[in-house]
């Protein structure tokens, strides 16, 4: 028996040696990707298959010696055995080449790794946060921004991003609203497509290019509706909300060719999304026929135990695989438990094969089998990252993301000479906060500050005073932000500067690490001493331009009432200061529109424009028994779609081509838009509908079309929209798409408070 075992071992070694020495059939470029997968899968052991379903975070200095001891050594051995399919947060050409070399040259089959990274709003050169980009309503600019991010990330060895985040969200308490496109599924769907195409290219074939990366639609699904805006919380929503608000942007990414999905931390219908057969098998891979792969969120497979859904690690593993979660991000469970579960008959190997086929498909599409080191060009890395072209691109995106919320007393645009300007606020001279939360590949203090941007305009007298520190202590991605609430020592200097100024520009808001993952808030007011500072400055000089830096809608009722000019400037990334200065001085006429409603106070949250009517929507009997608050208006401070310009736009002559239509017949809508102000400018023309009665009640208004137009001073343009079944229907509670007869109201204008309206009927 002993000799027989030795003989088998020698034969195995001989076979492995022969296989490595000969050309592998799955490397034949003349065969289709599916044929190549068919050749590779039978050669893989069960352990190697499971290894493709395993993703590890970076765990050692890959250009240094091999790790000794602990989990790092174990992971290293798994990598050398071919038991790792993907690495996370390994970046830089030298580092990526080192780990790829192990996977390709030291494992039995040489299957390359896919290298993932959170490229949320840029890699090294940062664009505005995604919520800010959404405020541009400029789909081409958003696509270009994602392409810049893909260009830099791919030059650094990365070939997969965990974006776009397409969570529809209407609760500003949730910090991750900064990652998405806001509260509307229609706008969110259009932006989702733009970001997928920016990252991946227009077609699947474009993935093989060296400057594109695979995109990942997340978080599947309903993460934007966590209760109380509390991170990692449960979700309990209706099927109507799921089908009509949550799922459309995800479906849009599938139609756009997105290659990966990430499931979410939350529960839905009492089941963690990671273990949801309904979401992953029935809808995504079944009804939608998605042929890419699904990755878990960070350790979310293991977290099903804490949810109380899985009894132990083996149970969590089995439920995740059966549900359709193809790759395990940092739970360590697939690699530890899945082989045993298959051998015990608790998980069918066919499910493993399906997952591995999906993962291999994306690797082949990226061209990694043909050239595992295609993303490892040090010359390209040096030339691309931080290039002038990329900085110009993110500056353009930043300017387009700024929203003018208020402009009274003709304070804006600022005069370019002869003015005394006091610039006040710690954020005005901050080169770190504007980078936002998700900037893990970028370097600290690399943003252009607002002070630096305004200093480029040299013909005014500019004085800066911070007034008060915003934060105290250590600031990092992993730590809670602590705010200054006691030190007012800079107030007097700021008041003196303001008193002697013609105009005061105050930069206030959130620190960049105050929004993002793990940053839920119950207070949406200006943090720290900022509100007190604002009111003190107002007492000595009310000519204030308030510039907001934030990652979510804020509650600013006092400023909305008292401050004459308010500019929503978000966290705009690397070129923040230049973008803000060019808008303030009128070198760029602001054209942004809000992608989320701003509440009057946190008690209104969640607040959103596409709400449903109640049975008592208005005060018809002059008493208290109607839907309202007793202490504040029920409307938002600033509604969805709102944004001003330095010029003025008028709408007239709204027309529908006829009063009644048959099912399936297109509805043609047109409106004239006039630039009646004194500047050339851009306007986002928005079309909303209301299905006035239906088998499932419909929102009081729904965005169903928009167009960004440029108008010269005095110019008139006719804007046309076509409404098809895609815009006029809705999903019932079983997920069936319906087009029902009835009457529809059309509303067109410059915000969700659109001024012009008309109507039509759909007949049987």
Image (tube, helix red, strand yellow):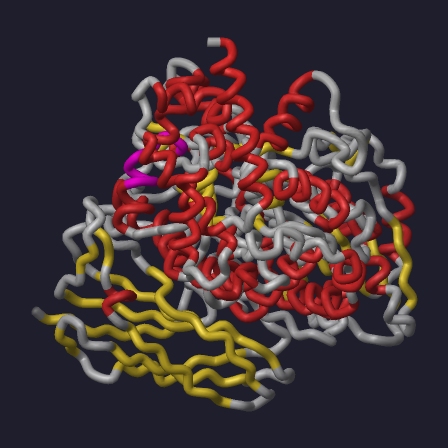
**Left or right of 329 in this view: 468:** right
- Residue 525 picture location, percent across and down: 62, 41
Front one among 685 and 247: 247
Residue 521 in view, yes or no: no
**Left or right of 27 in this view: 250:** left
Compared to residue 723, the image places residue 88 above or below, namely above
**In this picture, which residue range is highlighted in magenta?**
274-281
- Residue 572 picture location, percent across and down: 68, 56
Q: Residue at x 59, y 70 (%)?
A: 591
**Left or right of 89 in this view: 65:** right
Q: Residue furthest top?
A: 1
Q: Residue at x 50, y 53 (%)?
A: 364
Give the quarter of the image for residue 468: top right
Residue 208 in view, yes or no: yes
Front one among 27 and 223: 27
Mark count: 0
Front one among 1 and 225: 1
Residue 101 colored magenta? no
Q: Residue at x 55, y 43 (%)?
A: 111
Compared to residue 46, the image places residue 257 above or below, namely below
Q: Quadrant of the C terminus?
A: bottom left
Give the quarter of the image for residue 377: bottom right
Residue 275 colored magenta? yes
């Amino acid at each position: 028996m002993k000799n027989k075992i030795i003989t088998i071992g020698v034969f195995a070694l001989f076979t492995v040696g022969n296989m490595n020495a000969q050309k592998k059939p799955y490397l034949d470029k003349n065969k289709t990707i599916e044929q190549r997968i068919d050749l590779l899968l039978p050669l893989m052991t069960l352990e190697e298959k499971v290894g493709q379903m395993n993703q590890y975070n970076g765990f050692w200095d890959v250009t240094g010696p091999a790790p000794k001891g602990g989990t790092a050594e174990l992971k290293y051995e798994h990598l050398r055995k071919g038991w790792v399919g993907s690495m996370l947060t390994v970046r830089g050409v030298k580092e990526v080449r080192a780990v790829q070399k192990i996977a390709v040259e030291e494992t039995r089959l040489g299957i390359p790794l896919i290298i993932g990274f959170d490229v949320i709003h840029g890699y090294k050169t940062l664009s505005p946060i995604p919520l800010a980009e959404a405020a541009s309503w400029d789909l081409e600019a958003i696509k270009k921004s994602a392409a810049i991010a893909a260009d830099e990330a791919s030059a650094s060895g990365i070939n997969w991003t965990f974006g776009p985040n397409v969570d529809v969200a209407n609760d500003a308490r949730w910090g991750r609203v900064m990652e998405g496109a806001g509260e509307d599924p229609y706008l969110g769907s259009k932006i989702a497509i733009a970001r997928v195409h920016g990252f991946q290219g227009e077609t699947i074939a474009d993935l093989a290019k060296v400057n594109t990366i695979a995109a990942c639609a997340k978080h599947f699904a309903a993460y934007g509706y966590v209760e109380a805006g509390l991170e990692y919380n449960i979700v309990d929503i209706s099927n109507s909300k799921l089908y009509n608000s949550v799922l459309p942007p995800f479906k849009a990414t599938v139609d756009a060719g997105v290659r990966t999905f990430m499931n979410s931390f939350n529960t839905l219908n009492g089941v963690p999304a990671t273990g949801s057969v309904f979401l992953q098998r029935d809808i995504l891979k079944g009804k939608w026929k998605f042929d890419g792969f699904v990755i878990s969120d960070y350790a979310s497979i293991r977290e099903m135990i804490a949810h109380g859904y899985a009894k132990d690690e083996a149970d969590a593993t089995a439920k995740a695989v059966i549900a359709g979660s193809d790759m395990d991000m940092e739970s360590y469970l697939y690699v530890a438990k899945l082989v045993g579960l298959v051998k015990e008959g608790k998980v069918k190997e066919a499910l493993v094969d399906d997952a591995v086929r999906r993962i291999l498909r994306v690797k082949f599409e990226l061209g990694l089998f043909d050239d595992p080191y295609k993303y490892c060009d040090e010359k390209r890395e040096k030339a691309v990252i931080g290039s002038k072209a990329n900085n110009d691109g993110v500056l353009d995106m930043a300017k387009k993301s700024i929203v003018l919320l208020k402009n009274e007393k003709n304070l804006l645009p600022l005069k370019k000479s002869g003015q005394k300007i006091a610039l006040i606020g710690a954020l005005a001279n901050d080169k770190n906060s504007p980078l936002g939360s998700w900037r893990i590949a970028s370097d600290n203090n690399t943003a252009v500050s607002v002070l630096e941007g305004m200093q480029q305009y040299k013909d005014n007298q500019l004085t800066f005073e911070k007034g008060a520190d915003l934060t105290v202590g250590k600031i990092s991605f992993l730590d809670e932000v602590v705010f200054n609430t006691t030190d007012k020592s800079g107030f007097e200097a700021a008041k003196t500067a303001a008193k002697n100024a013609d105009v005061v520009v105050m930069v206030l808001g959130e620190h960049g690490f105050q929004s993002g993952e793990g940053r839920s808030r119950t207070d949406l007011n200006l943090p720290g001493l900022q509100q007190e500072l604002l009111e003190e400055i107002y007492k000595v000089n009310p000519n204030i331009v308030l510039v907001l830096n934030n990652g979510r809608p804020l509650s600013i009722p006092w400023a909305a009432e008292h401050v004459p000019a308010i500019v929503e400037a978000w966290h705009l990334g690397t070129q923040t200061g230049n973008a803000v200065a060019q808008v303030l001085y009128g070198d760029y006429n602001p054209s942004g529109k809000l992608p989320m409603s701003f509440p009057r106070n946190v008690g209104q949250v969640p607040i959103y424009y596409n709400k449903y009517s109640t049975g008592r929507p208005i005060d018809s009997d002059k008493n208290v028994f109607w839907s309202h608050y007793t202490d504040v208006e029920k409307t938002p401070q600033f509604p969805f779609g709102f944004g001003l310009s330095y010029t003025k736009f008028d709408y007239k002559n709204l027309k529908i081509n006829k009063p009644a239509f048959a099912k399936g017949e297109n509805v043609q809508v047109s409106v004239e838009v006039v630039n009646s102000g004194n500047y050339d400018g851009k306007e986002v023309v928005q079309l909303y509908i209301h299905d006035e009665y239906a088998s499932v009640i419909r929102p009081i208004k729904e965005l169903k079309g928009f167009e960004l137009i440029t108008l010269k001073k005095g110019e008139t343009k006719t804007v046309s929209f076509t409404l098809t079944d895609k815009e006029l229907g809705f999903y019932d509670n079983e997920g069936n798409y319906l087009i029902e007869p009835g009457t529809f109201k059309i509303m067109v204008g410059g915000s969700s408070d659109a001024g012009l309206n008309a109507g039509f009927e759909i007949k049987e």
